Image (cartoon, helix red, strand yellow):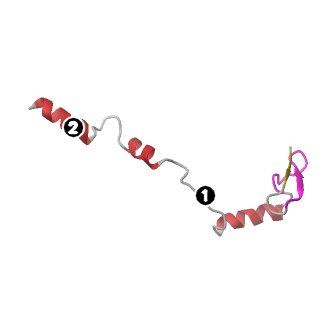
Amino acid sequence: MQWHCPICRKATDSTKDSDFPFCSERCRLTDLGNWASEKYKVSEPATDESLSESHETSPHQATSHEATQRDEHEN
C-alpha cells in the first residue's frame, strides 16, 4: 500500500518502509511526541456515556424503577 507520511508528506510504501505509515523513525517519534504533548486531541468521546451507565448495573441488581414496581406489587 502506498501512502504519504503524515508528518513530512514523503511517499511511503507498506512493503518497503518498516516505520509505515511513517517514512522514518524520526517521523514516527515526532508523531508520538505530538500525542504525548497533547498537540493531537480526540474531538469526541470514544464511547457513549449513556451506554456505559447501563452496563454499570449488573443483571442481578434491580433498577430503582423495577424495585418500586416490585414493592408496589408486594403491598
The x, y position of residue 32, in whole percent, is: 71, 63
Crowd rating for badge 2 (residues with CA inside 10 Å; few <14, some 14–19, many 20+): few
Query: Of the residues under marks 1 and 2, which one precedes in the sequence?
Result: 1
Q: Is residue 27 shown left or right of residue 67? A: right
Front residue of 25/34: it is 34
Say what amino acid the circle numbered 1 marks. Val
Q: Secondary structure at mark 2?
A: helix
Magenta span main SS: loop
Q: Secondary structure at mark 1?
A: loop
Write the residue at 88% across / 52% down. 12
Give the foreground label among 1 and 2. 1
Res 16 label = none
Magenta stretch encompasses residue 17: yes
Q: Are marks 1 and 2 in contact (CB under 8 Å)?
A: no
Q: Quadrant of residue 69?
A: top left
Q: Is residue 24 shown left or right of residue 45? A: right
The x, y position of residue 53, in whole percent, is: 40, 46
Write the residue at 76% across / 66% down. 30
Magenta stretch encompasses residue 38: no
The x, y position of residue 49, in whole percent, is: 45, 49
Q: Which residues are magenta?
A: 9-22
The image shows residue 30, relative to residue 11, as above or below, that is below
Write the residue at 19% across / 38% down. 68
Q: How many marks?
A: 2
How far apart marks 1 and 2 lie (CA) works out to 39 Å
Residue under numbered circle 2: 67
The image shows residue 41, relative to residue 48, as above or below, that is below
Quarter of the C terminus within the rendering: top left
Say what amino acid the circle numbered 2 marks. Ala
Residue under numbered circle 1: 42
